[in-house]
Every structure is written in structure tokens, then in C-alpha cells.
């Protein structure tokens, strides 16, 4: 399958910095932010965002992992992997790619068992094929694609992270 690079490591870093500033500006009055990263890539991206947000103004950022089956969200339990209360907190759900909104929609299920102050969504790439009523608040790249095309984001600890259109 042919891969076309749409974001290189520098692009991802630049977009991450921009999104981090947008998050800080949008939540300037918060003492703490909760980033919920959807495993696996959303959690990796949330970790990058956490570092960037903390470097901007030192705001406390807690990172929580969320596990769900992206193909069949109701086929197994959706797990928020921390016991912290989200009541009265600003929660930001993070994923690498938004396609139909389905993953983000189901990721909200365990979060809404609490009473958060505010819930926002971040994605690195938004494909704009919404079938569910979830639109990200913060987006690195909006990309119109065909339904047959796929976006792959690879986050690497060492080396070049990248996003590809396939």
C-alpha cells in the first residue's frame, strides 16, 4: 500500500506546540487539566501535549489512559485507567486521528459517569467524516479524504514520528 507523508516529525512538533498554547489560552483559569489519552496513539500524543503544556506555564497536568476496542466499543469494557475523580475538573480527551467521531464518542462514556466542569477534545489529524456528534476543539491538521483512504500516525521514542495517508 502506498504511503504519502502528510506530517513529519517537525510538523507534528509544531502542531503540538500550537495546540498546547490553544489549550492553555482556552483554560487560562484552571489550576489542573486532565488529559485522557485513548490508547495506544492517543495516549502517546497526550504525553507529548502534557510536556508541552507544562513547559508553557507550569500548570498541573494529569495524564490518564483510556482503553477501548475501537472497532467494537461495546464489545468490551471501556476502561479509564485511573481512580481519580473527574468531578469539577477540565477533561481533555486526546486521540491521534478523528474519522467518524465514533472512538471519541465512546471514550466519553466513562468520563460522563462523573460531573466534569468541561470536556474538550484534541486530535492531531481530523478527517472530517463525522457520523457521530463529536467535533474536536483542537486540531493539528484537518484533511479531507475519501472513505477508502486511511491515516496512519507513528509515534517513535527515538527517530522520526510521522503521519501518512494510505
Image: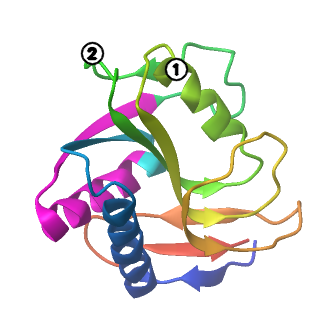
Image point 29% across, 18% down: which residue? 85
Which residue is at the far left? 58
Span highlighted in magenta in the image: 43-66
Q: Which residue is mark 1?
A: 112
Expressed as whole percent of the image width and height from the top left, the position of residue 37 reads 41, 42
Residue 107, by quadrant, is: top right
Q: Which of the two residues, 53 or 69, is positioned nearer the viewer here?
A: 53
Expressed as whole percent of the image width and height from the top left, the position of residue 43 reads 38, 46
Q: Which of the two residues, 157 or 65, is positioned nearer the viewer here?
A: 65
Q: Secondary structure at mark 2?
A: loop
Image point 25% across, 46% down: which residue? 30
State whether residue 112 is above or below residue 34: above
| Colouring used for the render | rainbow
Q: Quadrant of the N terminus?
A: bottom right
Is 115 on the left or on the right of 62, as rendered? right
- Does label 2 or label 1 sit earlier along the sequence? 2
Q: Which residue is mark 2?
A: 83
Residue 128, by quadrant, is: bottom right
Amino acid at each position: 500500500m502506498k504511503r504519502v507523508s502528510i506530517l513529519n516529525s517537525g510538523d507534528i512538533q509544531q502542531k503540538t506546540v500550537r495546540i498546547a498554547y490553544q489549550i492553555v489560552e482556552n483554560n487560562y483559569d484552571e489550576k489542573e487539566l486532565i488529559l485522557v489519552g485513548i490508547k495506544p496513539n492517543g495516549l502517546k500524543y497526550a504525553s507529548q501535549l502534557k510536556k508541552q503544556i507544562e513547559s508553557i506555564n507550569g500548570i498541573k497536568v494529569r495524564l490518564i489512559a483510556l482503553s477501548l476496542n475501537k472497532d467494537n466499543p461495546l464489545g468490551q469494557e471501556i476502561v479509564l485507567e485511573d481512580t481519580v475523580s473527574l468531578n469539577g475538573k477540565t477533561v481533555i480527551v486526546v486521540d491521534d486521528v478523528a474519522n467518524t467521531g465514533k472512538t471519541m464518542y465512546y471514550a466519553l462514556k466513562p468520563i460522563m459517569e462523573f460531573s466534569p466542569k468541561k470536556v474538550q477534545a484534541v486530535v492531531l489529524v481530523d478527517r472530517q467524516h463525522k457520523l457521530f456528534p463529536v467535533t474536536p476543539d483542537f486540531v493539528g491538521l484537518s484533511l479531507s479524504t475519501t472513505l477508502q483512504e486511511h491515516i496512519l500516525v507513528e509515534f517513535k521514542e527515538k527517530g522520526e514520528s510521522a503521519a501518512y495517508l494510505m
